Amino acid sequence: MAHAALIDPLFAAELIGEDPILEEAIAIAAIEEEREEDRQLQPTRVLQYVEHTIPLYNDREFKAHFRMEKATFETLLQLLQPHLPTRTVSIEKKVLSHLWFLGNKESFRSVADRFNLSKGTLHATFFEVCEALKVVRPQIIYWPNRNEQARIVEGFLNRTGFPGVVDCIDGSYIPIPGPSEHRADYICRKGFPCI
């Protein structure tokens, strides 16, 4: 059927003349060819990633991908649920794609592909999750009271030997040339010397 497009339209009109069956066959072939071209333009996406793949992750894999434990994610979902619409994209997919984008060095396009979303939908849901997080922020991020501070400072001191620390979030790597002696002591988890 794809060969219908190879026929010049003027020549086709002379060829088929008044034959309605041949005319219909050529029209159907042209429509099918357009549909095939449209299918080829559709982006290839990961199907059922949230529904089938993520549930198979063990706790270590889940935390490596989403930067939080599964139990923490479930708590976050419960907090965000009243503040997120569920028109076409599940709350779970919205939050997981949001966390993936924040925790991995990937473009909107690749995150959208992974979560079977268009870039526009990912963009919209990203901001929906941002707005929901702003609403629940006081429940998640707050400065501890004096008793909590004292308990945290003591626990941090016992664990690390650093006094007066109330909290820390992640870390910053400042690349350095690295000393000639004990160079291995300065290599970070990313594989380069830093402080």
Image: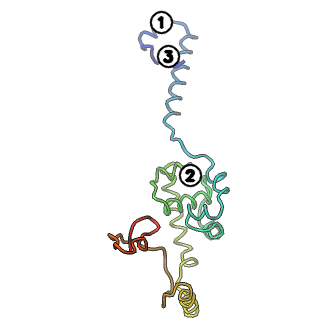
Q: Which of the two discs, 3 and 2, labels the residue nearer the N terminus? A: 3
Q: Which residue is mark 1?
A: 15
Q: Secondary structure at mark 3?
A: helix
Rounded to the nearest whole Å, what is the CA distance between mark 3 and mark 2?
38 Å
Q: Secondary structure at mark 2?
A: loop
Q: Which of the two discs, 1 and 2, labels the residue nearer the N terminus? A: 1
Residue that extends furthest to the front in the rendered view of this protein: 181
Rounded to the nearest whole Å, what is the CA distance between mark 1 and mark 3?
12 Å
Rendered image: mark on residue 4: 3
Rendered image: mark on residue 72: none
Q: Amino acid at mark 3?
A: Ala
Which-is-in-front pick, marks 1 and 2?
A: 2
Q: Secondary structure at mark 1?
A: helix
Q: Which residue is mark 2?
A: 115
Q: Amino acid at mark 2?
A: Phe
* Residue nearest the viewer, comparing 58 with 101: 58
| Residue 82 visible in the snapshot | no
Residues packed near mark 3 inside 10 Å, few (<14), some (14 to 19) or many (20 plus):
some
Residue 98 rendering spot, x and y as whole percentages: 53, 61
Residue 38 rendering spot, x and y as whole percentages: 50, 33
Residue 152 rendering spot, x and y as whole percentages: 56, 87
